[in-house]
Image (tube, grey):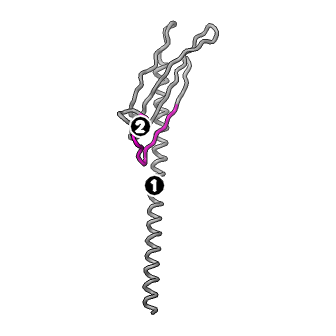
């Protein structure tokens, strides 16, 4: 009778250890995915920031003639160097307002950075993958 009891105990311990090993493997995998996601999110933030800097430079680099303000740059997508497989899409909208005799030009700049663009542009319209990352930043530039 002791032999049967020992066998049941050994099987029970093996089942418990197997379940514990599976739980630890799952926990380790989730931790690695979380770390990779945080790294990609930081890169996406920097890529979106780079897109805004580029767009602001395009709007502010050349002085406008007195009667005309510079137009918005066309919607542009590019891959910034050194930031992995991220794509940045920059959009610009121009509006005007006046403050007494002064006319001001407002440029609403928006940059989307993502690691899985749709048709070469962000944001993605496809079903996101497990490590899909997207960041959107916007600035208003007055000229």
Question: Looking at the image, which residue sits at the far left?
Answer: 119
- In this figure, which residue is indicated by the disc labeled 1? 32
Residue 60 position, x and y percent, is 50, 19
Residue farthest along the bottom direction in this orientation: 1
> What residue do we see at 55% from left, 24% from top?
140
The residue at 45%/68% (across/down) is: 21
Q: Residues within 10 Å of mark 1 (few under 14, many from 20)?
A: few
Classify 131 as above or below 45: below
Q: Position of residue 30 (x, y in %)?
A: 46, 56
Residue furthest to the right: 100
The residue sitting at 46% across, 33% down in the picture is 112
**x and y percent of residue 14 in the render?**
43, 76
Badge 2: residue crowd in 10 Å (few <14, some 14–19, many ≥20): some
Q: Earlier in the sequence, mark 1 or mark 2?
A: 1
In this rendering, the answer to whether 50 lies above or below 15 is: above
Highlighted range, magenta: 122-137
Image x and y of residue 117, in percent: 39, 37
Q: What label sits on residue 87 in the rendered view?
A: none
Determine the residue positioned at 56% across, 19% down.
142
Quadrant in the picture for residue 122: top left
Q: Which residue is mark 2?
A: 124
Pick the front one: 16 or 43: 16
C-alpha separation, residue under disc 1 versus residue under disc 2: 24 Å
Instruction: Give the quadrant of residue 90.
Output: top left
- Say left or right for 80 vs 67: left
Dividing the image into 4 quarters, which one contains the C terminus? top right
Could you tell me which quadrant the N terminus lies in?
A: bottom left
């Amino acid at each position: 009778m002791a032999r049967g009891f020992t066998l049941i105990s050994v099987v029970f311990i093996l089942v418990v250890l197997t379940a514990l090993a599976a739980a630890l493997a799952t926990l380790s995998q989730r931790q690695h995915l979380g770390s990779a996601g945080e790294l990609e999110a930081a890169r996406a933030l920097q890529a979106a920031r780079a897109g805004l800097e580029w767009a602001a430079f395009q709007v502010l680099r050349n002085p406008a003639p007195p009667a005309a303000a510079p137009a918005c740059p066309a919607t542009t997508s590019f891959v910034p160097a050194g930031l992995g497989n991220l794509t940045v899409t920059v959009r610009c909208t121009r509006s005007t307002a006046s403050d007494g005799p002064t006319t001001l030009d407002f440029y609403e700049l928006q940059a989307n950075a993502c690691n899985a663009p749709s048709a070469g542009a962000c944001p993605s319209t496809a079903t996101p993958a497990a490590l899909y990352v997207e960041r959107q930043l916007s600035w208003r530039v007055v000229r």
